[in-house]
Amino acid sequence: SYSCANSRLFRTVLYADPELAAWLEDNFVLHWSSERPVPQLAIDFGDGRVVRRTITGNSAHFVLDGEGRVVDVLPGLWSPVAFRQALESSLALHGALAPLEDDDRLAALAVLHETRFEADAARLGDEMARIRRRPDPEALRAWLRSPPGDGSRVAAVEAVPMAIGKAKIEAPILGAATRELGGRPSQRFVSPGPADDLERLMIGQRLAAIDELPASSLAIIAGEQPLDALIPASEREEAMARLVAGLLESIRQDTAKNALELAPRVHSELARRAREGEALDFESVDRWLYAELFQTPADDPWLGLIDPTIYTGLPDGGLKP
């Protein structure tokens, strides 16, 4: 129950959707693996009440061929409709690559991912034209080819927003603890893409194609009793409706970000690796994904939650190695 917030949302939003679940069973051999244990934060109020949350981390769906080579990666949470559409593209990609070997396969992989990158960049440009103004195409493509991180240490308060739905779960606690936890801000630049989550919501309303959750997802949420400790019984029905509406909003925002901001970076990286003969095995691509795209590099054991330049006044800095 205390896995990464995004993987919990996968189970509620994606795998619980009966049509999507049946389609996944028919088309994929499903396997789940954990990148590393998920950090947990507990706030003890001293009177028996405790708030416990997972913090940082992210999740992705890797599409591998029969030899374990990466064909595609879908980062983060998507709506069921957008998720299936993306996986249908992954299946088509796999089908095109299946009869090819060695250099021919790598050349085709590079071309196919480059084509998808260009299509995503054009779609994002069209969406930006609808909500604000059309960005310069070259600037937009250059931005989408640049990972949001360079693999160096990033503060947890900056890595968390990479997944919008999970950020809404974790940000209140991280925001309150910014002085004690987190690292220095990384360099930022003006994005030619969406400026904020409001613009992502506007894009996601078209892209996600989700107006409600299936009964199976609603049953999971109700069974978790998320409001019992917070809301009087007489007010829970209305509060639950607001909770579900907020979740739908997050799904739309996440879909927009993952489909048109992060997935193009995956296409660009996989195309580059195929062109330059770099490793396309799961471990190598996974290492890049978490270090550069999700900004949680494996060589930072504290995942951006600890800044050694901050004095805490606690024995051993409050750490237990």
Image (cartoon, helix red, strand yellow):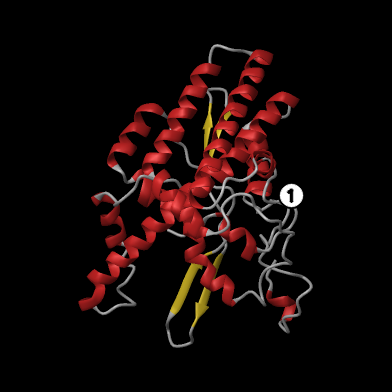
Label 1 element class: loop
Is 62 above or below relative to 306?
A: above
The N terminus, quarter of image:
bottom left
Question: Which residue corresponds to the image point at 72% horizontal and 24% vertical from the top-left?
Answer: 275
**Residue beneath disc 1:** 150
Looking at the rendered image, the quarter that the C terminus falls into is: bottom right
From the viewer's perspective, is residue 82 above or below residue 152?
Answer: above
| Neighbourhood count class around disc 1 (C-alpha, 10 Å): few under 14, some 14–19, many 20 upward | some
Res. 8 visible in picture: no
Q: Kindly identify the residue that appears in the image at 66 percent across and 66 percent down.
A: 305
Q: Amino acid at mark 1?
A: Asp
Q: Position of residue 67 (x, y in %)?
A: 57, 23
Residue 203's spot in the image, x, y percent? 46, 49
* Placement of 160 over or under 217, stated as above or below: below
Residue 88 screen position, x and y as percent: 43, 29
The x and y percentages for residue 135 are 61, 46
